[in-house]
Image (tube, rainbow, N blue to C red):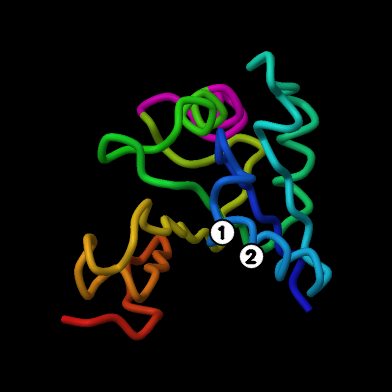
Amino acid sequence: MPRVLILLAHPQRAHSRVNEALAGAAQAAGFSVRDLYALYPDYLIDVRTEQAALAEASLVVWLHPVHWYGMPPLMKLWLDEVFSFGWAYRPGGRAGGRCTPRTCGWSRPPAGPNRRMGRAATTGTFSTPSSRRTSRQPR
């Protein structure tokens, strides 16, 4: 079974039934769940530890709410610091360094009731680097 790493970034996790349920189910299934707001409340990310966690995973899933059409600030900071030059990419933006390609997914549960969010809120999205459609979604 592939080693699955879930990176949870919700600034108010206790107030999110969806993120709480997804993280709990992932932990119960034996997946590694790293709650970034619990690990780094001061926003001082341990880059080497995070890079080591990524290096062990074959599947990485980012799980966070959508804030102003983007990700929460700690998730953005995590991406900027962990995917650093020389580790994640080389000159010219080419992939390489010590970070090897892996399958990644994004789960962005809606931050409101389905009646406000529309039909698309009932299904999540899952993206891979090739942008294939990998989940059943409304068209």
Dot 2 corresponds to which residue? 21
Residue 64: give its label. none
Position of residue 56 measured from the top left corner of the image (x, y, whole percent): 78, 52
Residue farthest to the bottom?
136
Dot 1 corresponds to which residue? 17
**Quadrant of the image occupied by residue 108:** bottom left
In the depicted structure, whether residue 121 falls above or below residue 6: below
Let me know if residue 25 is in the magenta part: no
Is residue 85 in sight in this rendering?
A: no
Amino acid type at image mark 1: Arg
Position of residue 69 measured from the top left corner of the image (x, y, whole percent): 26, 40
Mark 1, Cα crowd under 10 Å, few <14 / some 14-19 / many 20+, is few
Let me know if residue 84 is in the magenta part: yes
**Quarter occupied by the C terminus:** bottom left
- Main SS, magenta region, reads loop
Segment tinted magenta in the rendering: 81-92
In the depicted structure, whether residue 103 falls above or below residue 78: below
Residue at x 73%, y 57% (from the top left corner)? 57
In the depicted structure, whether residue 119 falls above or below residue 58: below
The answer to whether the residue labelled 2 contacts the one labelled 1, judged by CB atoms less than 8 Å apart, is: yes
Position of residue 55 measured from the top left corner of the image (x, y, whole percent): 74, 47
The one of 113 and 107 positioned closer to us in this rendering = 113
Residue at x 30%, y 68% (from the top left corner)? 114
Question: The residue tagged with tag 1: helix, strand or loop?
Answer: helix
The one of 116 and 62 positioned closer to us in this rendering = 116
Amino acid type at image mark 2: Ala
